[in-house]
Amino acid sequence: MTRAPGFVLVAILVAGAAFAQAQKVDPRDAAAVETCLKEVRGKNRHPEACVGTVAEPCLGEASGQTTAGSAACYNREHLVWEEMLSGTYERLRKGLAAAQAAKLQSSQKIWLEARKQSCEFYWEFLRGTMASPLAGSCYMRETARRALYLQFFVEHAKK
């Protein structure tokens, strides 16, 4: 009977992963980030200036003023960057030689674990409700940075 809590934890994690996969990117959110990226590139500004394009206005709304609401704001934008990261990773991987693709895959696995450890440390440290929006902000920011990092290689790949 001592294994029951472990099974409950696994069930919660599986249900959480299924919920995250079921979430869809709002096309308006994706368009807002894409518009920002086009604007900053045209002005020779760093694309990281676009991190927060969706979340910041959302946080200013009444629904973004609660702990759950602010976490939801960060999640909305995180979904955009996650989708962008996935597409960019695949485009880059397909254009690389086998050895480079293997290094990219290894790097991505390490980065995913580092992101998880970094962002989930808010839960370890705070152990309270404020950990949720802070972790959400972390996931959004780190995913955006990785998507932009990989985009550099896509844009500068040998033709």
Image (spheres, grey):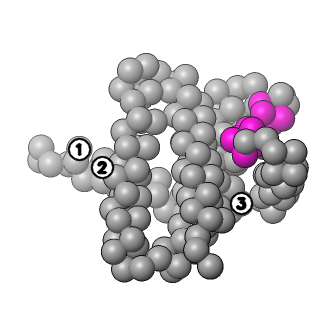
Q: Which residues are magenta?
A: 47-59
Q: Secondary structure at mark 1?
A: helix
For mark 2, does the 10 Å Cα neighbourhood hold few (<14), some (14 to 19), or many (20 or more) residues? few
How far across and down, in percent of the image, does residue 111 sit? 40, 50
Task: From the image, tell me which residue sits under label 1.
Answer: 5
Which residue is tagged 2? Answer: 8
Q: Amino acid at mark 3?
A: Val
The secondary structure that most of the magenta stretch takes on is helix
Marks 1 & 2, CB-CB < 8 Å contact: yes
- Give the residue pinned by disc 3: 25
From the image, which quarter does the C terminus lie in? bottom right
The residue under the point 35% across, 65% down is 103
Which class describes the residues within 10 Å of circle 1: few (<14), some (14-19), or many (20+)?
Answer: few
Contact (Cβ within 8 Å) of mark 3 with mark 2: no
- Measure the alpha-carbon separation of dots 1 and 2: 5 Å
Cα distance in 3D space between marks 1 and 3: 33 Å
